[in-house]
Amino acid sequence: MISSFYTSAAGAINLQSGVDVTANNIANVSTVGYKPSSATFSDLIYTNIHAAQGADSPLKSGHGTKLQKTDTLFTEGGLRQTGRPLDYALINSNNFFAVQKNGEVKYTHNGSFHLSEENGTSYLVSSDGGYVLDAGGKPIAMNSENDSPAIGVFSVKNEDGLVREGDTCFKLSNLSGAATAVAEPEMKKNYLEDSAVDVADQMTSVIELQRAFQFNSKLVQVSDEIMQTVNSLR
């Protein structure tokens, strides 16, 4: 089988993964506190042509591309006034609310909170039902929506080391370092941070990825036709 078949097939498969990343960004264009992802591609191994074993050659043959990594873009979304007393928006992109659910603490920019009653006590919870934590890492009890809770705001040394967990939440990792409470956090009450997805950028990415996918798909078709022609000559 000619190498062009494998090269173009590898490119098409990995470009499809890139399309999935962009499609997920577009699907979350209205999700509060959502941070978009960016796909990064890299070349696969190159083979020297007409060169002695172990020697380098100016003439090389590539073997396609692969999805190397997916980065989270911690850009700030626009602030939208809602008028709800339990809506909060963070100003700093490296600040996060801490939410505890099923014994696990996660971090998010989604400040759309609610009250949930448990054993006669009302607690401040996130949109998915997790406890919103204060600076000491404890759930916040409230009497009514008009209270002014001391919501904890945390930061990490390396936000790029956070692991995406879905529902606009992130988990700590060895690369991100531990989360530390911010002494005087900047946040706006009655506001929410909208999704940081730029639709124009995402549509441009869709067009680029689709064109590259179509090009690789065409190469697969051409390679298959060449193989059929060669086989018919036997």
Image (cartoon, helix red, strand yellow):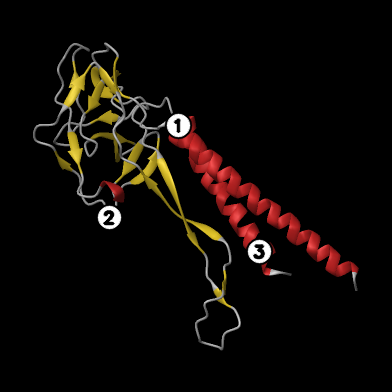
3D distance between C-alphas at marks 1 and 2: 31 Å
Give the class, few, some or many, for how many residues have Cα within 10 Å of label 2's Cα (few <14, many ≥20).
some
Q: What kind of residue is marked 2?
A: Leu
At x 50% / y 34%, what residue is drawn?
203
Name the residue tied to disc 2: 175
In this rendering, the label closer to the viewer, 3 or 1: 1
Q: Secondary structure at mark 2?
A: loop
* Drawn side of residue 194 relative to residue 210, left or right: left
Name the residue tied to disc 1: 200
Q: Secondary structure at mark 3?
A: helix
* Drawn side of residue 168 relative to residue 84, left or right: right
Give the class, few, some or many, for how many residues have Cα within 10 Å of label 1's Cα (few <14, many ≥20).
few
Mark 1 or mark 2, which has the lower sequence index?
2
In the rendering, at what x and y percent does residue 123 appear? 24, 22
Q: Secondary structure at mark 1?
A: helix
> Is the residue under label 1 in contact with that under label 3 (CB below 8 Å)?
no
Q: Give the total of numbered labels.
A: 3
Rendered image: mark on residue 6: 3
